[in-house]
Amino acid sequence: MAPITYDDLEKNFSLLKKSPEKFLELANEFVRNQPEHSGGYFSRHFAWEKLGQVERALEDLRTAHRLGPKVTDFYAIGRVLHSAGRFAAAVDALNAAERDDPGWKQGRGPFIRADCHARLGNLDAALADCACLSEDHFFPYGFLGLPEGDKQQVIEEIRRLAAEACGTARSS
């Protein structure tokens, strides 16, 4: 059998949904054969994350960044940390993405960071990130654990999360 190529990984990306173990096998083979290719590690992080292996996913993202730095690495690290409930660390990663990406305000980064800030009780910072959302913003059904709805609904949920975080912090 011919070695797995990066194109093979991309073509089989849909395996992540139904068989992340199978995708992980392909990604592992690719990384074994091409250990200096950043894309293999970046791709493999999705399988680790899907399988609940957050530290392995983060390790692969850091390796990908060391081998071929891209601003998308910081976004991915921030997203993985957010999904793991490590909100302060996610904010740090997303701050790095903002520093390196002139198109920061048009991406999903401010949305994820707003949610992190809210969950940390930092309402002003969360609302500053919400200001970056487009007026026609709509995010369906809480995908990625983020607030769903249009911009106003998201802002209302951000306010609720921040108030909840502050209430929890005071009662501890």
Image (tube, rainbow, N blue to C red):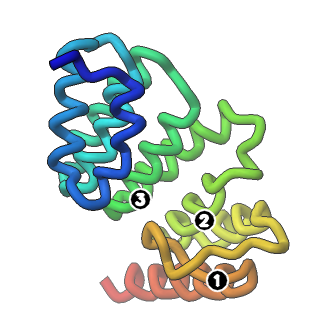
Residue at the farthest right position = 135
Quadrant where the C terminus sits is bottom left
Give the number of the disc on residue 119.
Answer: none
Which dot, 1 or 3, sits closer to the camera?
1
Quarter of the image holding residue 58? top left
Give the vertical position of 23 relative to 158 (above or below): above
Instruction: Give the number of the mark in front: 1 or 2.
Output: 1
Q: Which mark is residue 114?
A: 2
Amino acid under label 2? Ala
Kindly report the distance in space between the C-alpha atoms of the residues bearing marks 2 and 3: 11 Å
Q: Pointer 3: what residue?
A: 82
Residue 154: give x, y in percent of width and height.
65, 80
Mark 2 Cα shell of 10 Å, populated few (<14), some (14-19), many (≥20): many
- Check the image and report above or below for 48 versus 169: above
In this view of the protein, which residue sits in the foreground, 121 or 25? Answer: 25
- Say which element carries label 1: strand
> Against 2, is 42 above or below?
below
The mark nearer the N terminus, 1 or 3, is: 3
Find out whether the residues at labels 1 and 3 contact each other: C-beta distance under 8 Å: no
Q: Could you say whether the residue bearing mark 3 is in a helix, strand or loop?
A: helix
Residue 55's x, y, as percent? 22, 44
Q: Which residue is mark 1?
A: 149
First reached walking from the N terminus: tag 1 or tag 2: 2
Who's the residue at 24% across and 32% down the image?
A: 27
